[in-house]
Image (spheres, helix red, strand yellow):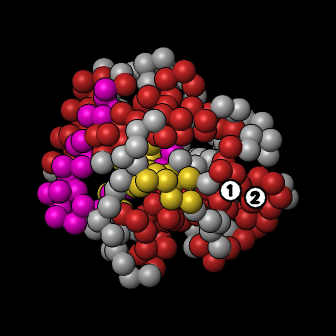
Amino acid sequence: MKIVFNDKFYNSSYIKDGASAPGRMEAIMESIHNDSKYQIVRNGRAEYSDIIRVHESQYIDSVRNNQALYDMALLSAGGAIKASQIAMESEPAFACIRPPGHHAHPSSGWGYCSFCNMAIALKKLRDEGRITSAFILDFDAHGGDGTIDCLSDWKEAIVLNPMAEGRNEYVALVESFVKKLNYVDIIAVNAGFDTYEKDVGRKLASFDFYRIGYVLKMFSKKMEHHRRFAILEGGYYLPDLGKNVLSFCQGFE
């Protein structure tokens, strides 16, 4: 399994928000580095031609008004693209990127999000003729309204934002939904670790992230193509963030 990352994501000075909190990327990558089985792959920036597939030019220009944020947002979208390309080679990938993207709409963004990284990566694959369908699981504590909006013109892109009261019901909902799905060309994950029991979501235990990753791994095995990738969204309880990301990756790999 490959971990997509660029050292520039350590820079927390481009904007002050929860996703750019000092130590957040370090917490994740320290856990990853402590497990020697993962290969770190450096990503570059997305091109303007990738962003315009999803976002209106006027909105892109508004993000560019903050050049430092724009540069980081292009790098984040590039990480999602790189992870999706690795997945197309039947190898799982996790992109440790920021800013996040699942609250970014074609002409607006909120919740620390600039560009819709997931929609950009998937639509690039679709437009290149490499996929025609996708399943997207978003297990962030906040629903991925931007991803849904940006993919609304693509009926073969199925998005699940699980809603359940307890942790076991949550994982069971994911499993039952996946079992009912027909074939999809790729499995994609908006991985928001703020659903953690000590984070804002107050729901999932660390092992539940493993369970979710494992369900998706088995689904990709059932599809017989093993194409799956995940990109980082939320997750703000830094003492356990690295542990939670690693737990998901261990189930997903």
The foreground one among 200 and 19 is 19
In the image, which disc is placed on residue 70?
2
Which element is circle 1 on? Answer: helix
Amino acid at pointer 1: Ala
Amino acid at pointer 2: Tyr
Q: Residues within 10 Å of mark 1 (few under 14, many from 20)?
A: many
**Horizontal side of residue 161 vs 123, given as left or right:** left
The foreground one among 247 and 166 is 247
- Residue occupying the point 44% across, 24% down: 196
In the image, residue 237 above or below residue 128: above
**Horizontal side of residue 66 vs 149, given as left or right:** right
Q: Pointer 2 and pointer 1: residues touching (CB < 8 Å)?
A: yes
In the image, residue 165 above or below residue 22: above
Camera sees residue 222: yes
**Horizontal side of residue 225 vs 198, given as left or right:** left
The x, y position of residue 57, in whole percent, is 72, 71
The x, y position of residue 54, in whole percent, is 58, 67
Camera sees residue 149: no
- Residue occupying the point 79% across, 46% down: 14
**Horizontal side of residue 237 vs 249, given as left or right:** right
The x, y position of residue 243, in whole percent, is 44, 28
Q: Which residue is mark 1?
A: 73
What stretch of residues is rendered in magenta? 207-232
The extreme front residue here reads: 36
